[in-house]
Amino acid sequence: MAEQDKPLLIKRYASRRLYNTETSDYVTLEDIAGFIREGREVQIVDLKTGDDLTRQYLLQIIAEHESRGENVLPVNVLNDLVRSYMVPGGGVMPQFLQTSFDMLRESQSKMMENMNAMNPMSKMPGFEAMKAQQEAFLKAMTGGFGAGGWTGGAADEEKSEGSGEDLDDIKKQLAALQEKLSKMK
């Protein structure tokens, strides 16, 4: 099994410090969020008890981003999540979210395969620039979910010159759209 295929094991010490077992150094929540954005799965376990703390820390990462004003989830989605926990048996929300993200990763992968496949459009002037913009847009929309080839990592950013500025513009436009949508509700 390749290193990237198995989860990155992070151990939490009694002092609450997080230890990366692959690189033998301490990491922060932001470091862990970076591993996930790069497409890496992580598993966080308590060193003493062996308890799996992954869910707790992933929720903490989301909460910290929300507290900094980075709206990860719209309020109506957060309300639906809370409601789903009030339903005996947890309701259908967890399965719905899992299926939705699986479909998103699959369609993203197919879209990238179609863009990369030989097609008549690839000979058009400006196709590479259009492709780079599309990749930046997908990365901004999906947060760089890594499945099946395209992870939206630093290597992809280096391939297309100027995509950093395009990505910033797309992020600003996305934030404005989210704000408009939240005002509509």
Image (cartoon, rainbow, N blue to C red):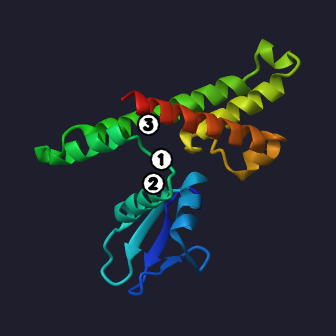
Q: In 3D space, how far apart are the residues under numbered discs 1 and 3 (Cα atoms)? A: 22 Å
Q: Earlier in the sequence, mark 1 or mark 2?
A: 2
Disc 1 residue type? Asn
Contact flag, marks 1 and 2 (Cβ < 8 Å): yes
The image shows residue 138 at horizontal and vertical percentages of 62, 34
The image shows residue 69 at horizontal and vertical percentages of 50, 53
Q: Residues within 10 Å of mark 2 (few under 14, many from 20)?
A: few
SS for callout 2:
helix
- Left or right of residue 150: residue 82: left
Disc 3 residue type? Asp
The image shows residue 42 at horizontal and vertical percentages of 48, 62
- Above or below, 30 relative to 178: below
Residue at x 80% of width, y 48% of height: 158
The residue under label 2 is 66
Residue at x 37% of width, y 35% of height: 99
The residue under label 3 is 102
Front residue of 5/60: it is 60
SS for callout 1:
loop
